[in-house]
Image: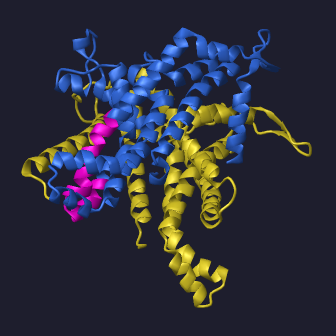
Chain colours: A yellow, B blue
Amino acid sequence: MRFSFLTRLTLRSWTILTLTFLYLPLGVVAVLSFNKATSLSWPPRGLTLDWWRQTWEATGPRDALVNSVKVALVASLIALVLGTLAAFGMHRYRFFGKTTLSFLFVLPIALPGIVTAIALQNTFNRRIDLGIVDFRVGFGFHSLVVAHATFCVVIAYNNVIARLRRMSPNLLEASADLGAHGSQTFRLITFPLVRSALLAGGLLAFALSFDEIVVTTFTAGSGYETLPQWIYSAIQRPNNVPQVNVVATFVMMVSIPVAWLAQRLSDGPID
Amino acid sequence: MLVYIASLALLVVAAFFRLDGFTGQPTTELTTDNLEVAFTTWDFVRVVGRSVRVAVLVTVVCFVIALPVAFFVAKVVRPWARRGLLVALLMPLWAGYLVKGYAWKAVLRPGAEFGVNKDGGFLSSVFGYTPGFGQVAVVIALSYLWLPFMILPIYAGLERLPASLLDASSDLGAKPLRTFSSVIVPNLLPSIAAGSIFTFSLSLGDYITPRIVTEGKFTMIGNLIQSYLLAPNQPLAAAFTLWPLLIIVVYLIVMKRAGAFDSL
């Protein structure tokens, strides 16, 4: 279809405006992290690297960063395993209640975080008596991992099932025709094809967990602080503005390339 | 998954528990009082109405921004520029949720024109105008946060739309606007519905962004839930969560009708 010059111009301008809208706020914060003044006011007053040095030396944000990485690593690994198994199961078999189950898989991302958060907090706080075992999950590192894995599973699942759906069933049949066993087909055909989807799903799950604040607030308990929690509480203290600017810029600088990598991987050669 | 569903079920049950006025702890005695408070108190219903309004506004804003952009990237731009542009549009998604809310606070910070005795943020000092910290700020910040979720499904939908379909339409004498309304939009409906699931439901339950960009002056359902949870009145908070739960399940069912699930 051909487009008139005016249509193209309008669409192009609109896209450029949108890109400005998307990057302007991030740019403002990045610039402010080198600002001498200690408020969010614009324009910045003078250039300084002091805040970067000061934040680097502070223990609060660094401990929080380490905690975040630990939780995100473990949670995304668990999510990856469970999500992949679920995706294979849902893809290969037809069974009673399959549509309902696929509906349920969307629920944790569609429902507001706070609903998930309270639901999980409520459960972790309760004594669970299964007859043989009687326990209470409680709060801390382990509860955070379980909570994060819950919503990360969805991401892993979606990535893997999308890849499986795009995969031609002919490949598996061809492999079987050539005399490969089920496990050989998996090792030589299926796995290489979904590998990049797995990696992408894992990275996205990691990014999601790393960034999560709502569920974290309600399931971390006291004494375990992740980076988003640190940022959130620092935002509310007026004298922390410079440190927040630095941490915010740092988060952008780390997570955007990771996301870019995930993006590249999930488009890996397949068709 | 099981943990999640069990937790949700427990939560629904918890809404029926009575709060022991003496110890402040929830008892297992059943009552419908919490539900009655949550669903009939006028002030609370107003907050729900406000949240739904914000969620709808955000969805509309995202749609209006996303459709031309997605169309430009999918159909107009040359193929070599397509990937890079798409990535550029989606990258801010990963910049960190709090970081983005905070960034808008820096951009929207009111200055002298609000009669505040402080220096304004970016908009205020560059353009001399900012909508300040209010409902507009909440809608802007939430639209910003969820925009990529709208762009992506619409882009995917457009990509699936064969170019021959558009050519056929123009061959049959349809003007571009007619092609747009009779061919493109109907075919995109499932994708738009899929995108709106994210923009709508993510906005509806958000309580952190409104808190950050309005400095706590704007109350949505999530803020209400959180404040009762800290009160602490867990049963009442649980009763409030039924609001978004119901709204979203209804929304999902409607969107499923529109074919949204196949486009996720």
**Residue at (43, 18) in percent of width and height:** B218
Residue depicted at 14% across the width and 44% down the height: A10
Residue A73 in picture, x, y percent from top left:
58, 53
Residue at image x 47%, y 67%?
A166
Q: Is residue B238 in the magenta section? A: no
Q: Quadrant of residue B127?
A: top left
Q: How many marks?
A: 0
Q: Which residue ends up furthest to the front in the rendered image? A: B172
Magenta-span inclusion, residue B84: yes
Q: Quadrant of residue A87?
A: bottom right
Q: Main secondary structure of the magenta part?
A: helix
Q: Residue B24: percent from the left, percent from the top?
A: 75, 14
Question: A210 and A38: which one is in front?
Answer: A210
Q: Is residue A201 left or right of residue B89?
A: right
In the rendered image, the vertical position of residue B19 relative to residue B103, given as above or below = above
Residue at x 60%, y 85% (from the top left corner): A176
Q: Nearer the viewer, residue A212 or B234?
A: B234
Tell me the quadrant of the picture where the C terminus of chain A can be found: bottom left
Considering every residue shown, the one lying at the far bottom of the view is A178
Of B40 and B186, nearer the camera is B186
Residue extending farthest to the right is A132
Above or below: residue A267 compared with residue B104: below
Q: Is residue B232 visible?
A: no
Where residue A117 sits: x, y (%)? 62, 34
The stretch in magenta equals: B61-86
Q: Is residue B80 left or right of residue A149?
A: left
Work out which residue is located at the far left of the displayed protein and give it: A5
Q: Is residue B221 visible?
A: yes
Q: Point out residue A227 in the picture as x, y percentages from the top left corner.
A: 52, 39
The quadrant of the rendering that contains the N terminus of chain A is bottom left
Q: Which quarter of the figure has residue B210?
A: top left
